[in-house]
Image (cartoon, coloured by chain):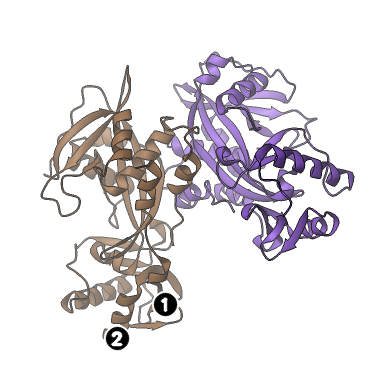
Chain colours: A brown, B purple
Amino acid sequence: MSLLEKIHACNHWDPADYVPFVVAGERLGLTRRGFAEALAAEDRDFRLDRDGLVWWSAPTEFDARSAQFAAILARLVDAGLIGPLHREPYPVTAGGRGQARFLIDRAAAPCFGVRAFGQHLNGYVRTAAGLELWVARRAWDRRHYPGHLDHLVAGGLPWGVSLSENLRKECHEEAGLDPEQADRARPVGAVTYCRASTSGLKPDVIYCYDLELPADFVPHCTDGEVAAFYRWPVDEVLAIVRDSDDFKLNCNLVIIDFLIRHGLIGPEEPDYLALVQGLRAPLP
Amino acid sequence: MSLLEKIHACNHWDPADYVPFVVAGERLGLTRRGFAEALAAEDRDFRLDRDGLVWWSAPTEFDARSAQFAAILARLVDAGLIGPLHREPYPVTAGGRGQARFLIDRAAAPCFGVRAFGQHLNGYVRTAAGLELWVARRAWDRRHYPGHLDHLVAGGLPWGVSLSENLRKECHEEAGLDPEQADRARPVGAVTYCRASTSGLKPDVIYCYDLELPADFVPHCTDGEVAAFYRWPVDEVLAIVRDSDDFKLNCNLVIIDFLIRHGLIGPEEPDYLALVQGLRAPLP
């Protein structure tokens, strides 16, 4: 296997399978064709025309629009058109988090191919022999990727929480880091990718952070989501990313970005340019 | 002015103005339509068809192909169709430097819209007050961007020289750094952009490096290309990039990348996502 394949695995989707999700003339996502047809047939608030799946009855104002969309989602759950909700509001935006047009339940975001935002933190230690990365193994009872390797800290970004607040919360829950330690994390960029999933399309933006940790730091998880922690030399982490499917899919990208920024994957690597560009795939 | 405008300034071109430059069925560049028409009319080695500007008589073998293209370029200079040559061979590739199909004189690369590769080095000092970046002012007699601000070390990547050899050479010529210091430079990624120029199209790949320098380091230029050196706090450099046109155009991108990787431009910045993606524009 190659590093590039790990990037391709996160960018696997066929544009022909989707139609735009349009609200007030603005394209805010991509809906799987079959789902769009079902929605237009079953629900009077949507129509399918040459623009795509149009929510024609959307109120203009943010709160009213969000409330009405929540009511629509509740109906769609009842009708069995979408699965159970998470009760976590995510912004609907064609740009950054700051350009939200209304809110959508996290679970429904892929059904409408809406961008989701998250944060991943590379917790590393500088040793005489080189960098070592803290890695978590996800608990075996987790719904997604049970038992897979994961970042020390990683999580989705719900609406209404600042980046630093959310990072503090995730740092505490997932690794037992206090707010002062969390605030020392350095934002270092973002990776973007888009992938077809069972529920629809996932165009994701992950804000990446580096946090250098002292040699005597030992993480502990406070929310039961982690089965174990490991501290491995970056060469070993690179080999795991390249040669196995042990890591949760999107962690591979954030780790490749880390290895490139720290000079551990260099421009002599034949795929270097494809890797560098592949980590920031244009989102649909 | 905004940081994003600096990225847009390096990505200014209209695809409608160009036709593919095709050799042995492979698209290797983009040629301005008028130049392609002139070439097809004047030179029997080229034809313009629905694939684009086709060099139909190209030999199969690398060296023979390069030699014949050099002879063609010499004729085109004589005919006044292209300007004087640099006598510096660049690879012609639709991918990375390692996938070269033949060689082209550096001066003619934009005429055929061929990718060019370069290296830029961020030389910085860690102080109690934060990072400071070494900046060079280009000599006033330079052909391109006289008197503009530039990186401590920056240069193009000719064919047949390894990345580390070329960096050593540029480090010595432009800043008086010895090979041991040059080898400590850390590769940290690449920026890509594509821009129309007077001579054609410039799809560029710049490999970026960070080099932390001691507080007492003082650069000196050995090839007369630098008028002065300055060491400025990164906040000031950020303001110059954002609010002026003082830097050579592509330096702005490498500095924005530096500021993002070091957490000095963070994800709270409204344009963050556009900046992060804009630094790695897909090349045509």
Q: Nearer the viewer, residue A153 or B79?
A: B79
Q: Is residue B271 left or right of residue A239?
A: right
Q: Is residue A132 left or right of residue B236?
A: left
What is the quadrant of residue A123 in the picture? top left
Q: Nearer the viewer, residue A64 or A49?
A: A49
Q: Is residue A123 left or right of residue B259?
A: left
Q: Secondary structure at mark 2?
A: helix
Q: Secondary structure at mark 1?
A: strand
> Vertical placement of A18 versus B86: above or below?
below
The residue located at (30%, 44%) in the rendering is A251
Q: Which residue is mark 1?
A: A52
- Type of residue at label 2? Ala
Graded by Cα atoms within 10 Å as few (under 14), some (14 to 19) or many (20 or more), the crowding at tag 2 reads few
Q: Which residue is mark 2?
A: A41
Residue B238 visible in the current orientation: no
What is the quadrant of residue B37 in the picture? bottom right
Q: Position of residue B31 (x, y in %)?
A: 71, 54
Graded by Cα atoms within 10 Å as few (under 14), some (14 to 19) or many (20 or more), the crowding at tag 1 reads some
